[in-house]
Amino acid sequence: MNFPPLIINLAPTGAMATADKNPHLPLTEEAIIADVLAGARLGASMAHLHVRDAAGQPSSDHERFRQVIEGIRATPEGRELTVCASTSGRHGQTLEQRAAALDLTGIAKPDMASLTLGSLNFVNDVSVNSPDAIRFLASKMRDRGIKPELEVFDLGMLHFAKALIAEGLIQPPYYFNLLLGNIAGAQADFSDISALVQQLPPNAVWGLAGIGKSQKHAMGIGCVMAPAVRTGLEDNLWQDTHPRLPASNAGLVNWLVELARAYGRPLAAPAEVRRLLGIAR
């Protein structure tokens, strides 16, 4: 069987982790840029970005997004990367704050932006995404020519995606990120993954991501069957659990690259990913 090239999506920071849990977590614009570029040199072709404020807290500041995206784009290895800006609202941002990065222009304009397709519980908090908020963000992405990274934690979110497709709010080809291992969502096992994949619409490119201890399970399954796999410190802070060793973004990308090599899976080049997703430069 000939496997298609594997898309590696690096999520280096996220909105939840703190440096006291893992000193390798990149929090400044400079550190995020450095980790993304290191991942690109190893084989990552996409970057899913969050930014933090001066105190290391989650931020939606469009100026910080601008600095990070322009810093990535200014380099040979970052020029063709598919760059996704988060629109997460897990820390009480207003809808306008969540959408701020969508107004960036020039080389700072993101290629993609995250769109979580429903509300959900995490272990200790909640992500609230009302239907009106999702439609607002989807509409703004459509109007700005920014492709949604459709975040799916359960089957209900996939069904809502189909409603948005029917309403003309999202356009093919679609990119779905199937996030596995959350306490209130689908798990990193074949039955849950199969149920999700069977419900994907036509013209869908899909990737697997695992949260916490599910990350390596998702990466392993993804190397066998998925077009894309997400890795990075946003989802998991640990390289190993016995003993518990802090991971780095480069270490997690390298682990995935070596796994893909063991399976004989080639890596997708950034330009290939852009063509696949219909993202122009």
Image (tube, rainbow, N blue to C red):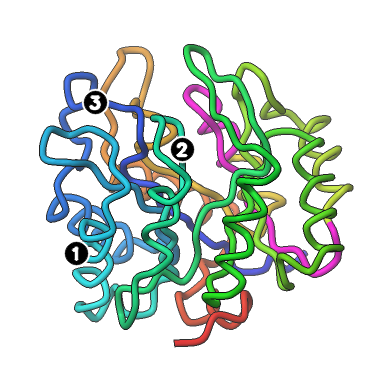
Instruction: From the image, tell me which residue sits under label 1.
Output: 67
In front: 214, or 165? 165
Label 1 vs 2, first from the N-terminus: 1
Can residue 116 be found in the magenta stretch? no
Instruction: From the image, tell me which residue sits under label 2.
Output: 89
Is disc 1 in contact with disc 2, using a CB cutoff of under 8 Å?
Answer: no
SS state under label 1: helix
Mark 1 residue type: Gln
**Quadrant location, the C terminus:** bottom left
In front: 65, or 152? 65
The boundaries of the magenta stretch are 201-219
Residue at 58%, 75% (x, y): give it: 143
Q: Is residue 123 left or right of residue 160?
A: left
**Quadrant location, the N terminus:** bottom right
Instruction: Indicate which disc residue 18 carries.
Output: 3
Position in image of residue 130 (x %, y %)? 65, 37
